[in-house]
Every structure is written in C-alpha cells, then in structure tokens.
Image (tube, rainbow, N blue to C red):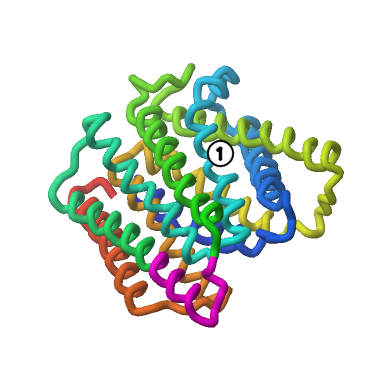
Amino acid sequence: MWFLFALLTTLAWGAADLFYKKGAVEKDKYSHLKTTVIVGLVMGVHAVYTLITSDINYDFANIIVYLPVSAMYILSMTIGYFGLKYLELSISSPIQNSSGAVTCILCLVILGQSLDALSAIGVVMICAGVIALGFVEKKLQNEYAIGDDRKYAIGFVAFLMPVLYCIIDALGTFFDAYYLDDVATTPLLNVTEDTFEAVANTSYELTFFICAVILFIFIKFVKKQEFSPKMQGNRLCAAVFETVGQFFYVYAMSGNGVVAAPMIASYCVVSIILSRIFLKEKLAVSQYITIIVTILGIILLGVNDGLSGDF
C-alpha cells in the first residue's frame, strides 16, 4: 500500500503548494511565520484527535526523540514559505522538490537500501524530470528577466530559499527513512509494528504545534502584528492539505523510503499544473516534456509494484 499512500501525499501536497502561494503576502514581513502558525495549529488539532481516538500508547518523550526529523521539516517549510513571497510557484516548487534526488542517494549509500531494475528506472525518470524542470524554470526566469515581463526577475536571496529548502528537507526525509525503516531498529519509544508510523507523525505534529504557539506569541504580542482569523483562509486550506499529506507520508516512507521519497518529491508537478490553472501561468514545451517524464516514472513505479504483488 505504500504506493497509494505516496500518491495521496503527492496530490495533497501539490494542492497545499497552491494555497501556500495564494496566502503569501509579499508586503507582509511576517507572512511566512503566520503561515507556519496556521499549519502548526491545524497539525496540533490533528495530533490531539489522534491521541484521543487512537490507541497508540503514545510516549511524549518521542517529541524529543523525533526532534531531528521534525526540526528539519519545520525549518525547511518556513524557509519555503518565505521564498514563495517573492518567487513564482512554478520556479520555487521544482527546485524545492529536487530534494527527493538527494534523499534517494543518501538512502542508497548510507542506509544500504536497494532497487530492482524497473524501480530504478522509475526513480531515475522522476529525479531527472524534477531536476530538469528546475533547470527549465531557471532558464525561463532569465528570459523573462531580460524581456518585458519582470515577474521572474528575482534577487539572489529569494532564489536561495528553495535551494536551502531542498537541502534541509532532504536531510529530514533521510532521517525519516532511518526512523521509519523498521520497527525493530527505530529510535522511537514504546512503539509496535502497528503504531510506529502514527507515533512518528504525532510527534512531528505536536512539535509543529509547539512552534506555532511560540511564533503566535512572538508575532501578536512581541511584534504587535495583526493576525486576523478572517485573513487566513488560503493558509488554512494549505494547512489542511499539508496535514492530510503528512498523514499519508509516514506510511509511504515506512513502506519503501528509497522509492517513495523521489516519487513524493514529484508533487511539484501537481503544483505547477494547478498554478497554470488557477494562477493563470503558462507552460512551455520544455516544461510539458519534463512533467510527462516525471509522471511516466510515477506510473512505472506503480505498475511495477502492482506486478510484484505489494500494491
């Protein structure tokens, strides 16, 4: 079932990206922090719901145990929210999500995971498509900057944000592959084969909630910034999709992390398609080609896993 979970994560996070962009306010100095607050609050609600309705025998010490993973994800996401204030979604998302290629290499080299031939081809296609898409978007950025359309003309600091996201998120995903690879070796406390994914996700969500509370106090009472609930619609939608994606993500990573990681990284394809539909951006031929290559890689992984009897 890991492939189904990875696919659902891909779709949910692709939709979340669209609402993250719609909720990014360039003129608001604290827009990215406000987005982090809303996401953290929604995740906190889901964590409490899980603790109340599920018998996972949760040990709160796992918040500390899982902190290396949680910290990488929360930091990378906040950096990504900052970049979206100044970058087009179609530029930021492919660069950020090339982290799957980095994670794949780390899993193969350090964790010693392996791939069969068809899965290897699928992973290569996904990684190649995502990375190529990043290069294509950078090329388009340069062309637009030279021409009359200035929307792609950005500064070095803004362009650096998705690059930092890529590196930090790759570390988080690599740590996750280690934590969720096997219940017998996971550092998580008081877990079983049936509960260790839920424990990991709950630990992450509770950590995000704690960060959200701290940031809310900082924004509202230290910096005296307006934080009207009526203005948080897009951020709330993004947070819901983010939380849904995260729920499925831990199960995808626990099933086959080395394949799931680059597949999930391809959610930028969904983001770009949605940005063209709802943000009225246009696709170049080269973009269509890279998107098709990535989608074919995803299909190949699914078909191969189905033939092997795991799907």
Q: Is residue 116 above or below residue 16?
A: above
Q: Is residue 72 above or below residue 262?
A: above
Tell me the residue that label 1 is attached to: 75
In the image, farthest residue toward the left:
117
Q: Residue at x 46, y 39 (%)?
A: 168
**In the rendered structure, does residue 149 fall within the stretch colored magenta?**
yes
The answer to whether residue 21 is seen in the rendering is: yes
Q: Is 274 or 199 nearer to us in this picture?
A: 274
Q: Is 30 or 6 nearer to us in this picture?
A: 30
Q: Residue at x 63, y 51 (%)?
A: 239
Going by the image, does 32 lie left or right of 125?
A: right
Magenta residues span 137-153
x, y percent for residue 72 = 50, 35
x, y percent for residue 131 = 33, 57
In the image, farthest residue toward the front:
146
Please tell me in which quadrant of the rendered image residue 224 appears: top right
Q: Is 294 or 310 nearer to us in this picture?
A: 294
Q: Residue at x 60, y 52 (%)?
A: 81
Q: Amino acid at mark 1?
A: Leu
Q: Is residue 32 above or below residue 204?
A: below
x, y percent for residue 245 = 50, 49
* Label 1: few (<14), some (14–19) or many (≥20) C-alpha neighbours in 10 Å: some
Q: How many discs mark residues in the rendered view?
A: 1
The answer to whether residue 1 is seen in the rendering is: no
Q: Secondary structure at mark 1?
A: helix
Please tell me in which quadrant of the rendered image residue 139 appears: bottom left
Q: Residue at x 83, y 47 (%)?
A: 225
**In the rendered structure, does residue 80 fall within the stretch colored magenta?**
no
x, y percent for residue 114 = 19, 38
Q: Is residue 70 above or below residue 229?
A: above
